[in-house]
Image (spheres, rainbow, N blue to C red):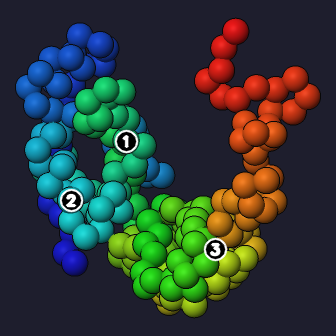
Amino acid sequence: MPDILLSAETGRKTGSRTTRRLRAEGKVPGVLYGTDIEPTPVAVELKALRQAMSTESGANALLSLEVDGTRHLALAREFQRHPVRGNVIHVDFHVVRRDRPVLAEVPIVLTGEALEVHRGDGLVDQQLFTLSIHALPGSIPSGLEVDVTDLVIGGAIRVADLALPSGVATDVDPEAAIVVGQPPRVQALGGGEEAVSGPEGSTAGGPGGSAPGGGE
């Protein structure tokens, strides 16, 4: 998809007072940096930033950041969010080149239905939700799909099983599990109710243990 145009203001002063004023005006403070550019304090409209990040590419959207009449090819990085409201309160913009690979985090999306796992009352346990990859800025995939249709209890789909798009590579351990077919919880604990129940139906808590919720 084409680069997303995003305008940025420069000349902002640093400091908490200026930052609060910008946020009150619906703007997000940030920094523009790169190999051939001095770190530059900037500010962008929060609404425009949200729109830029809401495309299919998500946080890896390729931006044409206009600063003082000059456009920089950039990626938004290092989002800081409000601990309660969750809105973006600071963002770094990394200037990139089309012909140089960059590091990016790409979401992993499970597809299909693991019927064998569900028939055995097991659990499809996703252990890796994003994958760190290297790719040219214009070739970063919006997501990586993992089909769990053939997953069975005790089985796993690993990084080595991924079919990465052309031009995309990863340094993540190929043996790292993305998704695992976990056995039923009772079976995993070692058997039936006898494995978790004490005499007369009470829950075993080890020597001197008592049922949860019990008191003096």
Q: Are marks 2 and 3 in contact (CB under 8 Å)?
A: no
Front label number (2 vs 3): 3
Query: Which of these two is toward me, 84 or 72?
Result: 84
Q: Is residue 92 left or right of residue 163?
A: left
State whether residue 170 is above or below residue 26. Answer: below
Residue tagged 2:
54
The residue most toward the left is: 25
Q: Residues within 10 Å of mark 3 (few under 14, many from 20)?
A: many
Q: Quadrant of residue 123?
A: bottom right
State whether residue 198 is above or below residue 158. Answer: above
Picture coordinates of residue 142, whole percent (x, y): 36, 73
Which residue occupies 30% across, 19% down? 14
Residue tagged 1:
79
The residue most toward the front is: 200
Q: Give me the disc on residue 181.
A: 3
Q: CA distance from mark 2 to mark 3?
A: 32 Å
Q: Is residue 152 left or right of residue 21?
A: right
User: What is the tally of numbered marks visible in this picture?
Assistant: 3
Which residue occupies 80% across, 41% down? 198
Q: Is residue 162 visible?
A: no
Q: Quadrant of the N terminus?
A: bottom left
Picture coordinates of residue 114, whole percent (x, y): 52, 82
Q: Is residue 80 left or right of residue 110?
A: left
Instruction: Determine whether the residue tagged by mark 3 lies in a helix, strand or loop.
Output: strand
Q: CA distance from mark 3 to mark 1?
A: 33 Å
